[in-house]
Image (spheres, helix red, strand yellow):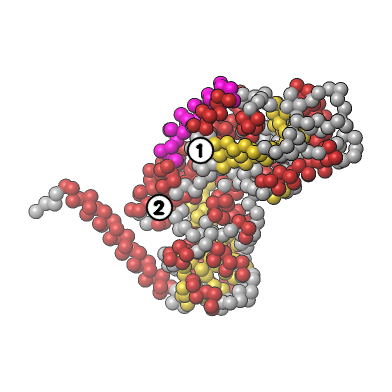
Amino acid sequence: MPKPFFFKPFFFLYRIFFRKSKRFQRSASNSHASQSKSHIHAFDNFAHRYPDLKNLSLIIFNMEEALLKSSSLFPYFMLVAFEAGSLLRAFVLFLLYPLMFLVSEEVGLKIMVMVCFFGIKKESFRIGRAVLPKFFLEDVGLESFEVLQRAGKKKVGVSNLPQVLIETFLKDYLEIDVVIGRELKVFGGYFLGLMEEKKKTNLSILEEHGGHDKMGSSDIIGITSFNQRLDDPIFSYCKDVYRVRSSDKRSWKNLPKEKYPKKLIFHDGRLALKPTPLETVAIFMWAPVGFVLVVVRILLGISLPYEVSSPLLAFTGLRLTVRTPQTESLVQKDPRLPNDKPKGVLYVCNHRTLLDPMYLCFALGKNLYAVTYSLSKMSEILAPIKTVRLTRNRQQDQDMMERLLSKGDLVVCPEGTTCREPYLLRFSPLFSEVSDEIVPVAVDCHVSMFHGTTAGGLKSLDPVFFLLNPSPIYTVQLLEKVSSEVSLCRDGSTSRFDVANYVQRELGKVLGFECTELTRREKYLTLAGNEGKAGCKTA
């Protein structure tokens, strides 16, 4: 009797899953046979068997299976597709996601690599350095990290991910000695979306670092998961192999930021959230509504007075909190200062996004002049206030700022570039030479979906991405005016560097941010591979 047509899809799926389960059983049996010479242990017994790890000569661990809490690789490839590719490439990857459940893990990995890397220029690919370390660090399990930190000698990180995605994270941020990932094939300077065979690559790299001489040694251990096949030749180097259960991962705590071996100060990319499948659905559902909302917000901000546009913008989801000092020292002029020529107030604020001056204008309810080190033509056209670009010539910039102050109040961000994390970059002392009426302004912002800053992308889209968030939050806090004893540096009584450092410390104290000596140059060298100057091509 022929089967009804609607039964055929069910039989098709049954055959796929049946074959997949049979392959898994065969792989597990082969894996067990190949590891008969090694001792297999549960990860929760690790601390009892090795209370002191200083004597171990080598620890080999699988990154995604034994270090990260989540074993899903989809979010990291979605970051690559969105940040290095385009919205269309990310959408194609999202549509192919259900297919991953119908194929083996290796085939699913190859599909994601092909979608994300095909046609991407190798020289300009910086996602592994500028974007992924933040998301990897937020997914590191504290318990597994502490095991690696206690290891006295060499640590080897193994991963099924491409080498270009994990090398910076493991070497620079977790101080792992050897990183073994998958190499990508390149033709004419572009990725082909294909990976090299991992077995030959793994063995050759480990032998280069002396692992071959210690094969089977009692002081070499491996850490992986119960889901990972143990027939990988690299684990044949281990005398003991510890396997992490899914229940172990669920009980792990996230690695706190204060325990990062290297501070995460700079990172790039537009996505502010980890694009899990559900979060990706939310992004694509919100995007059409968000772009309409961006247009509405821009039109309200540039066409209406502050007292009218402020409540309307709040109704669209833009949230602004303003805090002012109790005294009236913002506008009082010191009697000891010369009064031959009236000058405006110089507002000095830290730099979070290009919209810092705009939000200060809304907080004060009046227009200000704004000077900036980098401003796109698009932002300059859309800005409802007068913006002037600095030339980086000290004397020219000083003369220009003094001319603007003679016309009205001025706002400047002496960091010269934005910083997303709770750190303040070094303040340029130029502002302390042009005015003695200095008011520090502490600004901070919070976004839930997109970052409104970039080092390697199109800066003209920075305000668009910030306004694309459903409900971005801005906080503007005006501090007491800098006292005359501190700000009077033009007569030589106070160094201009002392004034700049004083303002930086006061802002850091109010915001709870850490003050650093890092500059715009260090940021762009880290994230974009250039010094952040005009004419530099960013990747």
Asked whether 51 falls inside the magenta stretch, the response is no
Residue carrying label 2: 108
- Residue at image position (41%, 47%) is 278
Considering the image in quadrants, where does the C terminus appear?
A: top right
Q: CA distance from mark 2 to mark 1?
A: 35 Å
Q: Bin the neighbour count of mark 1 within 10 Å (Cα to Cα): few under 14, some 14-19, many 20 and up.
A: some
Going by the numbered disc 2, the residue's amino acid type is Gly
Q: Is residue 481 left or right of residue 215?
A: right
Residue carrying label 1: 471
Q: Position of residue 46 (x, y in %)?
A: 52, 74
* Mark 2 vs 1, N-terminal side: 2
Q: Is residue 533 left or right of residue 151?
A: right
Query: Residues in magenta?
Result: 283-306
Q: Position of residue 329 (x, y in %)?
A: 76, 35
Q: Position of residue 418 (x, y in %)?
A: 65, 40
Q: Position of residue 93 (x, y in %)?
A: 42, 44
**Residues at marks 2 and 1 touching, judged by CB atoms closer than 8 Å:** no
In the depicted structure, whether residue 4 falls above or below residue 292: below
Quarter holding residue 179: bottom right
- Residue at image position (52%, 53%) is 162
- Residue at image position (59%, 55%) is 169
Q: Nearer the viewer, residue 496 or 381?
A: 496
As drawn, the residue found furthest toward the right would be 492
Image depth: mark 2 or mark 1 in front: 1
Magenta stretch secondary structure, dominant: helix
Give SS at disc 1. loop
Asked whether 299 falls inside the magenta stretch, the response is yes
Q: Bin the neighbour count of mark 2 within 10 Å (Cα to Cα): few under 14, some 14-19, many 20 and up.
A: some
As drawn, the residue found furthest toward the front would be 327
Going by the numbered disc 1, the residue's amino acid type is Ser
Please state the total of marks drawn on the protein image.
2
Quarter holding residue 21: bottom left
